[in-house]
Image: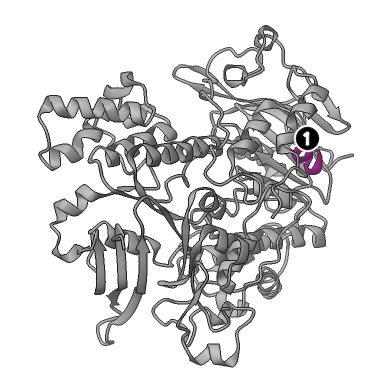
Amino acid sequence: MPLLDVDHLTIDIPTEGGLLHAVNDVSFTLERGETLAIVGESGSGKSLTSLALMDLLPSKAIRRARSLRFDGIDLQAASERDKENLRGDRMAMIFQEPMTSLNPAYTIGDQLAEALRRHRKVDRKTARDRAVHLLERVGITAAASRLGQYPHQLSGGLRQRVMIAMGLMCEPDLIIADEPTTALDVTIQAQILKLLRDLQQEFGMALILVTHDLGVVARVATKVAVMYAGRLVETGPVEAVFGAPSHPYTRGLLRAIPVPGRTRPGEPLGTIPGQVPSLVGPLSGCSFRNRCDHAQDACASEIPDRTVTPGHRMACILDPVQTWAEAPALALDDRRPQ
Amino acid sequence: MTIPVLELKDVTKTYAIRQGIFRPPATLTAVGGVSLTVARGEVHALVGESGSGKSTLARMLLGLIAPTSGEIRIDGVPIAMTNRREVARRIQPVFQDPYSSLNPRKTVADLIALPLVAHRIGSAKDRQKRVAAMLDAVGLPRRMIDAYPGQMSGGQRQRVAIARALVMQPDVLICDEPTSALDVSVQAQILNLLMDLKREFGLTYFFISHNLAVVEHLADRVAVMYLGRIVEERSREALFERASHPYSKALLDCVLTPDPTLGMPDAAITGAFPNPIAPPPGCTFHPRCPRATDHCRVAAPPPVPLADGFATCHLAT
């Protein structure tokens, strides 16, 4: 049984213009020890998907799924109290901007201890010791002296480390990190990502990384789910998806980023013409078809689920073998010698 | 010898930081002794982490703040002796966030024409013509001329910001993280547009970015800044193929190319940015440097000339 089983997750948000279909039929599973990266651009539904797992969606959002299970627990049937007990204890979330998710009026020590004492019957001393231990583990020096500090007294990198330590207080089975390093400098980003990966392996946790950065995905994740306009368009092991990117959107994204050693300086980058369609009102067919070079009449009605290689799937009418043949420009061995 | 379009000589900007009523103010050196030359028609990139002084330097180039000491020359003429308006005609900014840099209550036409109005250039009819020409140049449909920023996507807003900068027909654009707030596919469109406009209008870019992949893609020369100082300044090829300063190398190691076979890089440098009010003695990078020696801890390194540039490091060869 997988740790997390998401089957046909759909999120609708009522708006003045009609129903906004923010997330449509998203399915994936996650095992302990795996890192799933959900990658997409703004409005793709990647953050809402992760919030739906924690039941932290905006109140007017309507969540439906055929199945939404965490370690066998049906999240749709679970009581508010049960979900409260899961959050922070067995599932933890790390947000992009730690300044807004840490309480400015309480010290780091109080907030870390609270994270543990909320779920476990432990005394202050035990909670404090665990806080110090985890602060050290996430690479904060003089950890004991940090406990009395307030969030504003720490740098962005330190605050993000504190958030990670807080997420680990109860040794969760699943950590969801939404753009955890986007606000940080590149050297700090590398340190934090490495730390997350090391801790994940050490504690045997499952990790969901929500990001727009394909470099982060390739380096940290074991599985990737590419989202576009509320749908999962391509998913599979990272080596498979980056080795043979098959959905036209995934290929478009990979062509759009400059890569030292691969793209030639000064040459035009690949672009994806057009814009993301409105997701308000009834939707049909492939939502990428208005921007796709390969669009056919059939794209207006069907969204196939094709297997590229075992475990590597895409929602596109194109023949995976044919797309493989077209993909060599992106294949990893086709590089400018350095 | 041709005169560089921008020349910085030992430019320093310090701020007095109050530390309470009874303690004397401390000095924060935001930019310390920066010397650079930017040749006409080149893309000169400036990379560094937050707090390194990149934006302070940009604001001095735009004439918005004056250096505490040192000199900035535009086409050989000191900026201090140039009228503010003249500086604005020659050097225009493109900022990071097109959501906050455009007045939400002005139409696209008003936004792009604003610099012309401020400088009293042309009649109303001329301005209209130039606005329309600018829309064409940045690839915005003319029907958008009466749109408000709130009705546009991030990429379209950044195009408006670029059109507003170009309407003055400047020589130099100071681009401060122009694509950091944009989605991946939109970033590609804006970078392609910037390269096209550079060729079309013969522009020079001073391009500030923390994204080294973007810098490698479009820069001719790259300056790496750390704690207010340029630690390395090289041609693009030299920096990306044989960076000399340990900090430049660490930044390059942290570029995450989308290659799953590589895994996470070992960050060669640890720790975080030091307090700029009390910078470390000697080389300011030594507490984080994997190669620091006793000499580095006491003596500040001079710039060491290298093929294609210089590096400010005792170990540079």
Q: Amino acid at mark 1?
A: Ala
Q: Which residue is mark 1?
A: A244
Q: Is residue A238 magenta?
A: yes
- How far from the left and from the top, in percent, is residue A183? 52, 54
| Residue in the foreground of this view, choosing between A312 and B316 | B316
Compared to residue A316, the image places residue A122 above or below, namely: below
Compared to residue A169, the image places residue A15 above or below, namely: above
Q: Residue at x 55, y 20 (%)?
A: A279
| Residue in the foreground of this view, choosing between B263 and A332 | A332
| Residue in the foreground of this view, choosing between B40 and A307 | B40
Q: Residue at x 43, y 50 (%)?
A: B177
Quadrant where the N terminus of chain A lies? top right
Subunit under mark 1 = A
For the magenta stretch, what is the residue range?
A237-244
Q: How many marks are shown on the rendered structure?
A: 1
Q: Is residue B40 visible?
A: yes
